[in-house]
Amino acid sequence: MIDLRSDTVTRPNAQMRELMAKAEVGDDVFGDDPSVNRLQGYAAELLGFEAALFAPSGTMTNLIALMSHCQRGDEAILGQNWHTYKWEAGGMAVLGSIQPQPLPHQADGSIALADIAGAIKPDDPHFARTRLIVIENTTGGQVLPVAYMQQVQRLAKQHGLACHIDGARIFNAATALAAQDGADVYQKARELTAGYDSVSICLSKGLGAPVGSLLLGSTSFIQKAIRIRKMLGGGMRQAGILAAAGLFALEHQVRRLADDHQHAALLQQGLMAQAEAFGLSDVFQPAPVQSNILFCDLAPEFAAFYQQQLQQQGILCTGGRYQASQGPRVRLRFVTHLDISAAQIQQVLLASENALRAWCLTQQ
Ligand SMILES: *Cc1c(COP(=O)(O)O)cnc(C)c1O
């Protein structure tokens, strides 16, 4: 089985499991778990924040951040495709009584500075109080550059707003940017997050830990966040077993994200070449890839056939139907990760070639 549905499918390796088994633990709700404390301290220091908080999921660290920054009736500005708005079951509204102000995206995945500035409400009783700007990076696999991140952060400061990064895959963004100018990946991550009030990071995606996310911020912000984590049921007890995995992931599985990006690029180039070689560029369109996520837009009749052909050859990806300007499309998503090798990418390309050949036969 070659599972490209998500980088969340990664499993802890032998070394990680050994560290988990040996982890020193205590009751983390009392603040007594040495492994959790070590992970939180390490992560905060790594990105230059005062404090950090370990929680069960990225959905929860985002919600904790939103609820720590915003009171009931406050407003958060975010992108309409972002996880915090679209993929968290409306938690900010349901549980936080926070009004989302979603904004449309530009082609590069960002939301325009002018749109953000235009959405900030004046102090007027008709309006919710704008309180927070949320930025997601990477977003749909797209990498937002340091200059943009810093412009948003300064805009927030100018208006007295807080700013939060949903950095579930911030190390993928840092990896892609570091590859462009030869900088260190951790240094890039610090540049991307500098000046932000909070950052949420997933340990359980490409970094390969089984469970867990981190929220970074100031000491006083994390104090508030601890109460909200408790309120949401995210206070864990002997969580050091999980934190040990997270620490290993942060220390040893960040630099290897570059391999995942290379694999995604290989896959993209191979699929593009196949689409052209088989004359199928109108029904099979791999999008450019910047990190570890590759999207391919397919005509619906072809998509069902193609995905089934891949599945029969042991390859899994996800697919969602949507309405494009040229008509309905299915967008397949392939995510590379630490359990996918270069050899497996070649297997996927072979399987895809078989599928395209079979499709062409059905069209004769
Ligand atoms: C995965 C993800 C999250 C959090 O997901 P969990 O599954 O709750 O850990 C948040 N934001 C983005 C952009 C993500 O991709």
Image (cartoon, helix red, strand yellow):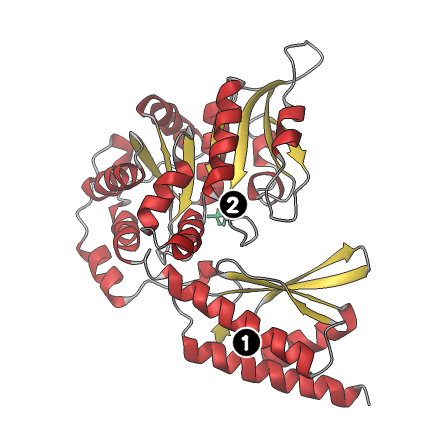
Residue 169 lies, in percent from the top left, at: 45, 50
Of residues 174 and 25, which is closer to you in this image? 174
| Residue 339 versus residue 120 in the image, above or below | below
Q: Earlier in the sequence, mark 1 or mark 2?
A: 2
> How many marks can you see?
2
Q: Quadrant of the C terminus?
A: bottom right
Q: Is residue 334 visible?
A: yes
Question: In the image, is 210 to the left or to the right of 41?
Answer: right
User: Which residue is disc 1 drawn over?
Assistant: 315
Q: Amino acid at mark 2?
A: Leu
Question: In the image, is 56 to the left or to the right of 94?
Answer: left
| Number of the front mark, 1 or 2 | 2
The residue at the point 65 percent across, 44 percent down is 106
Determine whether the beta carbon of the residue marked 2 sits less than 8 angstroms from the nearest atom of ligand 1: no
Crowding at dot 1, Cα within 10 Å, few <14 / some 14-19 / many 20+, comes out as many
Determine whether the beta carbon of the residue marked 1 sits less than 8 angstroms from the nearest atom of ligand 1: no
The residue at the point 66 percent across, 34 percent down is 102
Circle 1 sits in a helix, a strand or a loop, which is it?
A: strand
| Residue 354 versus residue 25 in the image, above or below | below
Residue 79 lies, in percent from the top left, at: 62, 38
Residue 144 is labelled as 2
Residue 56 lies, in percent from the top left, at: 40, 44
The residue at the point 53 percent across, 54 percent down is 141
Q: Amino acid at mark 1?
A: Ile
CB-based contact (under 8 Å), mark 1 and mark 2: no
Q: Is residue 337 visible?
A: no
How far apart in space, not on screen, are marks 1 and 2 (Cα)? 30 Å
Residue 148 is labelled as none
Residue 26: name its quadrant: top left
Residue 165 lies, in percent from the top left, at: 47, 37
Circle 2 sits in a helix, a strand or a loop, which is it?
A: loop
Crowding at dot 2, Cα within 10 Å, few <14 / some 14-19 / many 20+, comes out as many
